[in-house]
Amino acid sequence: MTGLFRAQAHRCGSPQTKVGVRTEEKAKDGGCAGWTSKPVTKDDWLGDADTCWQLKAGTSGAPARLKNEVSKPLPKKTLEAGGRFVVVAAGSTNGIKGERDRMQALTDEAVAAGIPIEHIDVIGSELMLPLRFCVRALLQVPINGLFRA
């Protein structure tokens, strides 16, 4: 994910020095497994604001397993400051319906906690990596400070 975030950040003018992805699977991350800063150019993936990413592997991305994610300290603070909270949910194998179910779980919790919902998003892992995104990422990954073209 670090390479994909960095490649997309490069593409849309988000500071690469502000891209971060937690590498320890069970780390206490305050609800934020990755971070991208506001890009210069609005982007389908990175949006138009600072973004707190939560990456859920296996069944941990199921709607019921997302309980308490949006109210964790970093997603809550990011949303209250006008940023985005995006959950990438592995194990979402039913496309748009799976994303909607996960989104509903997150927004219901946010509404109950008084957290803004306008910038919450869910991306199913099968939709996260379309060919276009992968090709761009592969062509733009820095190698010793240089970019392949």
Image (cartoon, grey):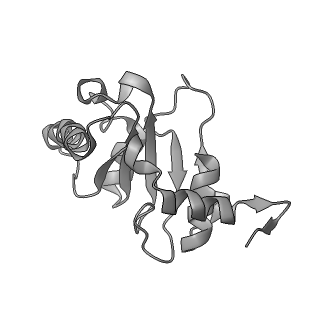
Q: Can you tell which quarter of the image residue 149 is in?
A: bottom right
Question: Where residue 87 sits in the image (x, y, percent)?
Answer: 37, 42
- Please give left or right for residue 42 compared with residue 136 in the image: left
Q: As displayed, is residue 94 above or below residue 128? A: above
Q: Can residue 19 be seen from the camera position used here? A: no
Q: Looking at the image, can residue 65 be seen?
A: yes
Q: Position of residue 98 (x, y in %)?
A: 24, 38
Report the quarter where the N terminus lies.
Answer: top right
Q: Is residue 22 left or right of residue 122?
A: right
Q: Nearer the viewer, residue 29 or 134?
A: 134
The residue positioned 43% from the left and 69% from the top of the image is 43
Q: Is residue 137 above or below residue 60?
A: below
Q: Residue at x 35, y 58 (%)?
A: 81
Find residue 72 and report its image quarter.
top left
- Count of marks, rendered view: 0
Q: Position of residue 101 (x, y in %)?
A: 19, 38
Give the camera-side residue of 57 and 66: 57
Q: Residue furthest right?
A: 144
Q: Residue at x 35, y 30 (%)?
A: 61
> In the image, residue 8 lies at what x, y percent?
56, 63
